[in-house]
Image (tube, grey):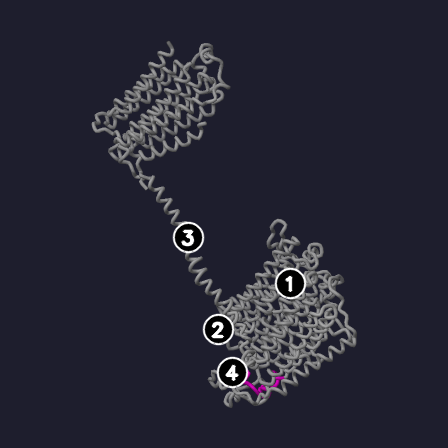
């Protein structure tokens, strides 16, 4: 059952991603990207990452993608007719490179030495059941990763200030 | 050591201050001749007085160890600690007295001689600078400080030979001296490196103390070191084969010839060997090379002097010949005899040069009055000057008698001691008999050519021309006074080191003992019976008399004609006049090939082609090409960058694949 | 046991993102493709976190934060470019040509 659900959503994610990069209209691309993100969120759930799945939907699909659409609308790119796709040669080179990248990434990630440090089967599932989905993530975040966590606050402030400065007409 | 010896820094500093002051004046007050002479001579006299105080302090000291004053640390580098240190010992004291004493007299003489020169302050600035470097040379407590002095006097020699640089011959004579000295300096540098490698120090005291343990007697290392040192001496002291610069150096003002190219700088090589006597005593082979070179030079230069017409050239070859005697002495381990001859030679040769300067000065002025363009240094244009220049003639005769070896004058004793040592050493090895014979023949020739010089210059008929004769007169007192002082020195200088058979003998030898005693253990005892010593002295007298008498009988100064009317020389006389064609030989076989090599190969091919073309420009071209290749990737197009980025990422990622 | 399939899917999604960056010229689409690649990487983290502990999930959290910041700055730049050039076609933005 689990396998069927996973493969179904994997198919949806891949198909939507392909559609996303081939659509002529930016709006269509953005919406297909949203589909990919939703399908990925389902895969997160299947991989016992409930909290991450939730913020994937909230932050990515909710916030960032709205930002995308907002910018597209703002710049009035929605009804673009001429394609921005490269020519046949560019597409061929891109495809070849992308295939190589995919193969290499796959090979590299498959080769990771996970066996020695692997948790007992179903451990994360049990932890989620015991502690709740949020605590599993929150506990390391506020203990082991406290300093990086605080630093992200600085990063976000810098990003806010930077984007305001860049986007303003006159400083 | 008495505290007066610590004043030694003042001796060195004073001439340097004089140089600074006169150098300043030469730019801003070139006409202040009185001030310049006051400073230039004043610092020398002051320096001489301080030297007297220092030397009397040294003489009063109980212990014989050298006094070393480190002014500052110069090159501290790990184990190599080189300070700017001055060393006062018995040997440097002798040199100090000669340099400052004779130097001061020559400075005084220069006031008169250079009176009408346009760049008078420059002359005195250079002269003071020379004395400064010479003092540094003889006072240096280690090889590098000695080397500064060594190079500095070379520089001043160059500057003063080319003093009248507007004439090309003078400028190229300066260059010749400088370049020939470079060859010798190369040897000195190599020797310094080898000494440091062997003993781990460059300070004289430490090097000589560790020499017995660091070197094997007559071993290859010590022989090489001493031979390289000798190469330096050969260049500086104008010995075969690097002597040809010294006759050309006569292009400089005559007092310069007296100070630098007769009394002080050219004797630096003798001083260096006397200073490193321990090393030479441990390398008998090198010692023999030094002595043989000296003897050969003494004879060779004396033969050339026989036929020179330029009065200063005669004296220049005479200087080379006398330096040969000194090397003969130090090569045989008779360091005291070598230094003794150095001192007496400083007196009589300075006197001879200054006397000739007085003659040239007089003749030059006479020519100036009558607008004559003849050569004021050619003896064929002189003759019979004794009537006009009685003082000069008198002191010149004293100096001639001294150098020729007239009994009981300074040169007699110093030359006799050298020949006596050679004769005594001959009992051990036959080669020293050869050296003795060469020296004896050279002594005969010396008496001959000096008498010739006197006869042609001061006696016989006058050849200057009737009109010029009206203007010829004795030089002013400021020039003759130093001559008289030097004549006293040339007359009585022998008293400082009388031979063993006379009462009060061996003064200088005894004085120098602390500086040379370390080498005594390696040298065979020189022993001559009193009879033999008397016999040799008698023989020397006979030789000198034969030379003088021979010249007087054989030469007929009345038959000479002025230089402009002189016929072409022939046969052996021409060979001697042209100095055995050594300059031409060097020019053909060394200078021209070197120039050809430099111009055709080193310049056109190596420098232009390889270094500039291939290396410098080639490298620039390669860099430019690589830069051009780099710019091909800078399309400014994001797509290209992304593709390159992905390729790079793929490549990096593939490194993690197993 | 979904680790292997998840890693495979993540590799495919990532290479689709790369492909998009390579073949599209519009800045805003390229931007979306970058987000797609982020997402693929996140999937890898999550898949491995199931086996190795929740640290991977924490990292996904950070990636999302950085992605948000990057999106904010990126859009600001895009707006600035558009205002200046009246286009988002990357072929026309070649001021860096050497």
Which residue is labeled 1 in the image? Answer: B139
Q: Disc number at residue B537?
A: none
Q: Tell me, yes or no, whether the two marked residues, 2 and 1, touch with CB atoms within 8 Å.
A: no
Nearest to N terminus: mark 4 or mark 2 = 2
Which stretch did the figure color magenta?
A: B376-393
Which residue is labeled 2 in the image? Answer: B169
Q: CA distance from mark 2 to mark 3?
A: 39 Å
Task: Give the image quarter of residue B302.
Answer: bottom right
Label 4 environment density (alpha carbons within 10 Å; few <14, some 14–19, many ≥20): some
Quarter occupied by the C terminus of chain B: top left
Q: Disc number at residue B365?
A: 4
Q: Position of residue A6 (x, y in %)?
A: 36, 14
Q: Secondary structure at mark 1?
A: helix
The residue positioned 29% from the left and 22% from the top of the image is A18
Q: CA distance from mark 3 to mark 1?
A: 49 Å
Q: Foreground mark, 3 or 4?
A: 3
Q: Secondary structure at mark 2?
A: helix
The residue positioned 75% from the left and 65% from the top of the image is B524
- Please say if C36 is above or below B213: above
Q: Foreground mark, 3 or 1?
A: 3
Task: Give the image quarter of residue B206.
Answer: bottom right
Q: CA distance from mark 3 to mark 4?
A: 60 Å
Looking at the image, which is closer to me, A114 or B292? B292
Residue B392 painted magenta: yes
Q: Secondary structure at mark 3?
A: helix
Task: Specify whether B494 is left or right of B247.
Answer: right
Task: Specify whether B415 is left or right of B29.
Answer: right
Task: Give the image quarter of residue C17.
Answer: top left
- Please say if A43 is above or below B442: above
Which residue is labeled 3 in the image? Answer: B614
């Amino acid at each position: 059952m689990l396998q069927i659900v996973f493969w179904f959503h994997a198919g949806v994610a891949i198909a939507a991603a392909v559609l996303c990069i081939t659509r002529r209209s930016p709006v269509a691309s953005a919406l297909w990207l949203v589909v990919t993100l939703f399908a990925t969120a389902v895969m997160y759930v299947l991989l016992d990452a409930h909290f991450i799945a939730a913020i994937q939907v909230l932050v990515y699909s909710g916030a960032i993608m709205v930002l995308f659409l907002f910018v597209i609308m703002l710049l009035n790119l929605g009804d673009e007719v001429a394609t921005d796709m490269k020519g046949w040669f560019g597409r061929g080179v891109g495809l070849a490179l992308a295939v190589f990248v995919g193969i290499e990434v796959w090979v590299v990630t498959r080769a990771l030495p996970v066996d020695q440090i692997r948790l007992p089967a179903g451990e994360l599932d049990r932890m989620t059941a015991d502690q709740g989905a949020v605590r599993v993530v929150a506990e390391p975040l506020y203990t082991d990763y406290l300093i990086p966590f605080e630093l992200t606050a600085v990063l976000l402030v810098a990003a806010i200030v930077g984007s305001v400065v860049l986007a303003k007409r006159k400083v | 050591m008495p505290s007066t010896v610590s004043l030694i820094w003042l001796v060195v500093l004073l001439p340097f201050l004089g140089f600074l002051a006169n150098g300043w004046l030469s730019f801003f007050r070139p006409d202040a001749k009185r001030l310049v002479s006051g400073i230039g001579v004043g610092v020398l006299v002051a320096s001489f007085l301080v030297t007297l105080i220092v030397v009397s302090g040294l003489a009063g000291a109980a212990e014989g160890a050298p006094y070393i004053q480190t002014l500052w640390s110069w090159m501290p580098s790990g184990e190599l600690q080189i300070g700017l240190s001055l060393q006062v010992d018995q040997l440097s004291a002798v040199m100090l007295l000669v340099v400052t004493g004779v130097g001061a007299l020559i400075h005084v003489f220069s006031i008169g001689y250079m009176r009408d020169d346009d760049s008078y302050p420059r002359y005195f600035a250079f002269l003071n600078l020379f004395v400064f470097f010479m003092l540094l040379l003889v006072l240096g407590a280690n090889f590098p400080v000695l080397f500064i002095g060594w190079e500095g006097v070379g520089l001043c020699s160059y500057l003063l030979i080319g003093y009248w640089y507007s004439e090309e011959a003078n400028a190229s004579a300066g260059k010749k001296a400088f370049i020939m000295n470079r060859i010798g300096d190369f040897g000195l540098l190599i020797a310094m490196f080898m000494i440091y490698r062997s003993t781990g120090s460059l300070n004289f005291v430490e090097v000589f103390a560790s020499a017995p343990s660091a070197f094997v007697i007559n071993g290859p290392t010590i022989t090489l070191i001493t031979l390289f040192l000798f190469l330096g001496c050969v260049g500086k002291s104008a010995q075969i084969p690097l002597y040809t610069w010294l006759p050309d150096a006569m292009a400089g003002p005559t007092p310069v010839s007296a100070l630098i190219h007769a009394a002080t700088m050219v004797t630096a090589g003798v001083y260096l060997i006397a200073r490193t006597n321990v090393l030479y005593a441990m390398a008998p082979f090198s010692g023999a090379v030094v002595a043989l070179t000296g003897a050969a030079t003494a004879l060779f230069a004396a033969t050339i002097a026989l036929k020179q017409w330029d009065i200063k050239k005669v004296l220049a070859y005479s200087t080379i010949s006398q330096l040969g005697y000194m090397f003969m002495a130090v090569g045989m381990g008779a360091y005291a005899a070598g230094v003794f001859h150095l001192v007496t030679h400083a007196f009589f040769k300075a006197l001879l040069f200054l006397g000739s300067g007085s003659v040239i000065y007089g003749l030059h002025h006479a020519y100036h009055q009558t607008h004559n363009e003849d050569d004021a240094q050619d003896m064929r244009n002189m003759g019979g000057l004794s009537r006009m220049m009685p003082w000069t003639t008198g002191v010149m005769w004293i100096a001639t008698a001294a150098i020729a070896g007239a009994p009981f004058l300074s040169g007699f004793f110093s030359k006799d001691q050298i020949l006596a040592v050679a004769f005594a050493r001959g009992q051990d090895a036959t080669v020293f008999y050869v050296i003795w014979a060469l020296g004896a023949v050279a002594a005969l020739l010396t008496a001959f050519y000096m008498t010739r010089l006197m006869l042609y210059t001061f006696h016989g008929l006058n050849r200057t021309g009737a009109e010029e004769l009206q203007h010829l007169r004795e030089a002013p007192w400021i020039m003759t006074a130093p001559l008289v002082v030097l004549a006293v020195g040339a007359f009585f200088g022998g008293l400082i080191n009388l031979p063993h058979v006379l009462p009060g003998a061996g003064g200088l030898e005894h004085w120098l003992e602390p500086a040379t005693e370390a080498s005594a253990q390696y040298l065979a005892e020189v022993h001559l019976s009193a009879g033999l010593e008397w016999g040799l002295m008698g023989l020397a007298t006979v030789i000198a008399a034969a030379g003088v008498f021979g010249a007087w009988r054989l030469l007929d100064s009345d038959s000479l004609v002025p230089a402009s009317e002189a016929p072409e020389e022939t046969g052996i006389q021409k060979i001697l006049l042209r100095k055995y064609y050594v300059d031409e030989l060097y020019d053909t076989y060394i200078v021209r090939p070197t120039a050809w090599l430099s111009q055709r190969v080193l310049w056109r091919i190596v420098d232009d082609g390889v270094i500039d073309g291939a290396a410098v420009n080639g490298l620039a071209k390669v860099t430019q090409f690589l830069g051009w290749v780099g710019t091909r990737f800078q399309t400014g197009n994001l797509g290209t960058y992304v593709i390159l980025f992905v390729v790079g990422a793929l490549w990096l990622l593939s490194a993690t694949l197993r | 046991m979904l680790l292997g399939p998840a890693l495979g899917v993540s590799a495919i999604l990532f290479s689709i993102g790369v492909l998009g960056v390579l073949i599209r010229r519009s800045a805003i689409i390229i931007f979306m493709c970058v987000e797609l690649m982020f997402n693929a990487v996140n999937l890898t983290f999550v898949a491995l976190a199931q086996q190795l502990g929740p640290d991977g999930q924490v990292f996904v959290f950070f990636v999302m934060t950085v992605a948000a910041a990057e999106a904010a700055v990126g859009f600001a730049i895009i707006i600035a470019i558009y205002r200046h050039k009246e286009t988002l076609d990357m072929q026309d933005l070649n001021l860096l040509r050497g």
